Amino acid sequence: MKTNPTNILLWLIVSLLGASAVGGIALHRGESINALWFITAALCIYAISYRFYAAWIAATVLSIDPSRATPAERLSNGRDYVPTHRWIVFGHHFAAIAGPGPLVGPTLAAQFGYLPGTLWILFGAVLGGCVQDMTTLFFSTRRNGKSLGQMARDELGAIGGSAALIATFLIMTILIAVLGLVVVNAMKNSPWATSTVAATIPIAMLVGLYMYKLRPGRVLEGSALGVVLLLMAVAGGGWLDGQAGLRVWFDHPGLSLAFAVIVYGFAAAILPVWLLLAPRDYLSTFVKLGTVVLLALAIVWLRPDIKMPALTQFVDGSGPIFGGKLFPFVFITIACGAISGFHALIASGTTPKLLSNERDIRMIGYGGMLMESLVAMMAMIAATVLDPGVYFAINSPAGVVGKTATEAVATISAWGFPVTVEQMSMLAQQMGEATLFARTGGAPSLAVGMASIFGSTFGQGMLAMWYHFAIMFEAIFILTTLDAGTRVGRFMLQDMLGNLWPAMGRTSWYPSVLLSSGLVVAAWGYFLYIGVIDPNGGVNILWPLFGISNQILAAIALCVATGILVKSGKLKYAWITVLPLIWLVIITSTASWQKLASSDPRIGFIAAANSLSDKLAAGALPPDKAAVAPQLIFNQQLDAVLVLFFVVLLWLIVGDMLRVCARHLRGKPVPPLAETAYHPSELEQAWVRD
Amino acid sequence: MGARLKLIDVCQSFWQAVRQLSGDDGYERYLAHHAAAHPDTSPLSRSAWFAHRQQQKWSGVNRCC
């Protein structure tokens, strides 16, 4: 570390700038605040935490040793263990961790106003999410790239290992269902969006055939072809929307689209990966990186004003998009972008097998998460540059604000967010849609936000094009997550079933593939189906469930890291993982408790089930609602059981970690550290660097 | 002249990075690894390598939320 005066001055300026930006955002009250403040605050905080906190963790807490050979060097096999340049690993890692989560969560959390979500994205990331990713990456690297589940089993015991496995399977199920719901809400009764999203399937297959049969392994050629075709599909969707004879083929209500997504998910899970999943992933990665960079440039260029107030009245728990008070629900709603347990599965497994030097762990683990946090920040900006009235009109489900446009507009204006029917139909017309009301889930409002930012930067004439580009952009990597998640779920299920009946464990045995894929698809398909038929918008139920499960997975990762730190004799530094762990335990336990016990039917599952069955018994429901009520009641009860199960899982593993730590501190035997022995690195770059 | 050469260098290393990031040069790197580690056996063909690589890549968790 250099401590010359210029350096000190530089960091002093960055600190002052960051502090005044955060202060500006937090204390500002009035008409509007410029989005550039958000970017400035984020970049300063990221820079300071990376330069000082992450460097200190790397040097002092983890004692990163650049002279030590990494698994990629020792076990190099040209396949999964490959020493790779750090920027390349960073690219792979970032592409793997950043999915649609950081775009959807902040958009939904904007119902509380811009401030709570923004602060959580900033401080949750630098103190929680980045630390989780970095420590998990480090410990997995020291264990030949073992998975989180294996580490939990080795370091804590069988309970920890099983808890990690079950939590992963459940979070996958809920995640896929809620993401499916986001896509369905974006496509319902929109021939343009539906045809564009549908076109991505044959395009991906075409690219797959190109890369597999025509020009094997030419990834860039195939992807370039695919991106051009995707852009044509966006434009083609607009043309199709104008053809009365064609558009009816793609004009469907939510339920039919949900079944289409379910059938698609099953097909994607049993088709060979080269045909659909792999090429779709290449396309989504390129489109994702391109769009994120474009959005960042457009925000800096345009410097839009934030129109959402810092705090809305919905901090009291009456929010239209999801019920629940600011505490704990803002922390549950924004998981990805602040702290996401799912990352621990990437940081243990694929990424550690690529590291050529331990020194890269800070940049990839901590830095990769900072990038995701920045993406979440941009999603927050895109959601809050909209007029709040428009934001609520797009995102509020019909069951809350009323079925007709007039009712919805009246309800939302009465909240103090003026919006008119004309304004909404004008906006819908500009975006090339029939209506934008009740498109809950985040994707459409983000698309409107992005379209208006891009439109102001690159010209207003193409708003509808930008809108549908943004919808396509989100749909394509939501579907990638859906495909990949279903496949991983299938492998996990095959693994579990293989313990009961060995033939089921053979991952390529077709009856086993069909059965296990069918079970996984049925599991998330069920939640997707319920989410679509729920008049209050399934997002209200599914997104908090997803947030809770994701944060519980994060808590498991932090338990494993804490256990290893204590066992390595680093008790005095264990607070780096203990502090975020305590916070996660508090928020997930509180949220779970409220989801179980709250008497508000928009928050408590049991209250919701009871209120609905009372109404059903009294005959107070209109026939269409009465028909689905028994299913909704059952689902609320099932969700209650699920939440209870999650929180029991959490406390089991926290208890297991505390038990192991206490035994270690009292000198009693505990599972030994599974760290691999030291081997000096022979890679030349280890010595010539810096 | 020197500046122009430098620009070409920059473009080339950028292109290399793009190829490596996307996995476009994966087969070349596989051949290099194979020649170094197992010189006595013949390497997989380009399409067999690609099929194997895809299968392996999508056997674990590698996409997140």
Image: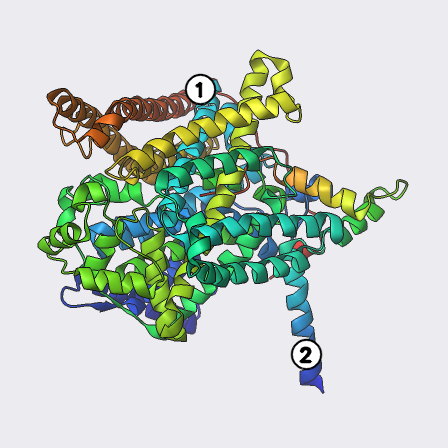
Percent from the top left, x then y, of residue B36? 83, 47
Q: Residue at the location (20% across, 29% down)?
A: A623
Three-letter code, disc 2: Lys
Q: Chain of mark 2?
A: B
Tell me residue A87's x, y (percent). 58, 57
> Which structural element holds mark 1?
helix
- Percent coordinates x, y for residue A189 in the rendering: 36, 49
Mark 1, residue position? A159
Q: Position of residue A239 (x, y in %)?
A: 46, 63
Asked whether residue A337 appears in the rendered view, the answer is: no
Q: Which residue is mark 2?
A: B6
Residue flagged by tag 1: what amino acid is it? Ile
The residue nearer to you, when weighing A684 against B16, is: B16
Which residue is painted at 24% across and 37% down in the image? A535
Marking on residue A263? none
Position of A361 relative to A244 (above/below): above
The local secondary structure at tag 2 comes to helix
